[in-house]
Image (cartoon, rainbow, N blue to C red):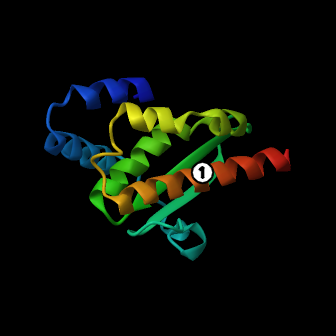
Amino acid sequence: MTPDEFAERFNRLRSWEDRYRYLIQLGRKLEPYPEEFRDQEHLVPGCLSQVWLVTTEGSDPSEMVFRGDSDAHIVKGLVAILLMLYSGKTAEEIISTDLQGFFEGLDLGQHLSVNRRNGFYSMTLKIREHAAQAMTAS
């Protein structure tokens, strides 16, 4: 599913209860997170719940592929959104992605707790750090 398709489906849901359920469903569809990366090094700082994130090269070496997981259902759904936005893109595309506009288009800011919002941006920062490191390495 593309980010635009997700936004269209998400915004068609009338109640926030339905939107939360949809986020939880997205999180349940994530590929299983590799146990060997469920460690302190891959833990995302700044998240109230535990969130792990790892990046690998895609089939095209310039693509970055992300895998993530969380111990909280809604946060796991937020991880799924970020992976949808960033995974499979080049470092340059990741850096230039307008997450703020996408986030505002979903109206998530008003319906997530401050802690979840901060965690969402911490995950984004971590992904952008990986992209910046990939850019300097190449």
Q: Is residue 50 above or below residue 117?
A: below
Q: Position of residue 122 (x, y in %)?
A: 52, 58
The C terminus sits in image quarter: top right
Q: Residue visible at 42% across and 38% down?
A: 103
Residue that appears at 34% across and 49% down: 77
Residue corresponding to mark 1: 127
Among all residues in the image, which is located at the extreme bottom?
A: 40
Q: Is residue 5 left or right of residue 57?
A: left
The residue at the point 31 percent across, 63 percent down is 72
**Residue 108 occupies quadrant:** top left
Q: Three-letter amino acid code at disc 1?
A: Ile
Where is residue 57? Give x, y as percent. 67, 45
Residue 2 at least partly seen: no
In percent of width and height, residue 23 lies at 28, 45
What x and y, as percent, mark residue 40?
56, 76
In this view, the residue in front, 29 or 85, is 85
- SS of the residue under disc 1: helix
* Residue 117 vertical placement versus 41 (above, below): above
Q: As drawn, is 100 to the left or to the right of 111?
A: right
